[in-house]
């Protein structure tokens, strides 16, 4: 009987260690930006973008994030504003982002706000397959959930908020 209890205890410990190795990474493109001033190189979110940010918060209301990453732009930071996140870190390139996640946040839940030309590249860099061929400049409503274990990632794609292709 004792051997069985020891075996079960060790099995549970082993399962916990293995499951702790899985990192959950959520990736979204920033919400709609204000395009009223073409000279503005760092625009804020538009009114439609602010609505999308609220929709994002509703979609992710049960998720508890350990950390988030955003580029230095206003729109990526504003996209994260409605989420409860203890720490937001700026990243400038995909390699540094992925290295930081894989080194410092194994077993954690991470949020990434990115751009249309980097979302799919981040998914690939984390070990996932592209769930779409490309994201266009009008694609704002996709969200990606990755379960990352070592150099492989399982990718789920969904849409949230008002569909942008109306």
Image (cartoon, rainbow, N blue to C red):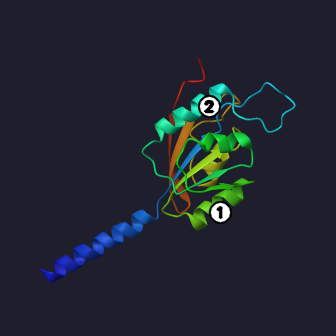
The residue furthest left is 1
Q: Residue at x 54, y 34 (%)?
A: 54
The reply, left or right, for residue 100 in relation to residue 24 is: right
Label 2: which secondary element: helix
The reply, left or right, for residue 112 in relation to residue 59 is: right
In the displayed structure, 24 sits above or below 77; it is: below
Q: Which residue is drawn at 53% across and 57% down?
A: 152
The residue furthest right is 39
If you read the primary sequence from the N terminus, does the residue marked by circle 2 or circle 1 appear first? 2
The residue furthest bottom is 2
Label 2 close to label 1 by CB (< 8 Å): no
Residue 18: x %, y % from top left:
41, 67
**Mark 2 sits on what residue?**
50
Q: Which residue is drawn at 29% across and 72% down?
A: 11
Quadrant in the rendering for residue 89: bottom right
Question: Front-most of 42 and 11?
Answer: 42
Check residue 10 in the rendering and tell me which mark sits there, or answer none: none
In the displayed structure, 128 sits above or below 54; it is: below
**Mark 1 sits on what residue?**
99
- Of circles 2 and 1, the one toward us is 2
Tell me the quadrant of the picture where the N terminus can be found: bottom left
Quadrant in the rendering for residue 31: top right
Tell me the quadrant of the picture where the C terminus can be found: top right
Label 1: which secondary element: helix
Residue 103: x %, y % from top left:
60, 67
């Amino acid at each position: 009987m004792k051997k069985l209890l020891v075996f079960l205890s060790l099995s549970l410990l082993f399962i916990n260690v293995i499951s702790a190795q899985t990192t959950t990474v959520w990736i979204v493109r920033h919400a709609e930006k204000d395009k009223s001033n073409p000279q503005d190189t760092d625009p804020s979110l538009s009114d439609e973008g602010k609505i999308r940010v609220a929709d994002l918060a509703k979609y992710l209301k049960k998720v508890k994030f350990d950390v988030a990453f955003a580029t230095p732009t206003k729109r990526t930071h504003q996209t994260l504003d409605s989420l409860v996140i203890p720490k937001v870190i700026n990243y400038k390139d995909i390699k540094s982002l992925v290295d930081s996640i894989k080194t410092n946040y194994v077993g954690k839940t991470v949020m990434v706000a990115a751009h249309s030309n980097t979302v799919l590249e981040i998914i690939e860099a984390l070990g996932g397959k592209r769930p779409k061929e490309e994201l266009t400049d009008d694609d704002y409503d996709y969200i990606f959930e990755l379960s990352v274990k070592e150099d492989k990632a399982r990718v789920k794609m969904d849409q949230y908020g008002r569909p942008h292709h109306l």
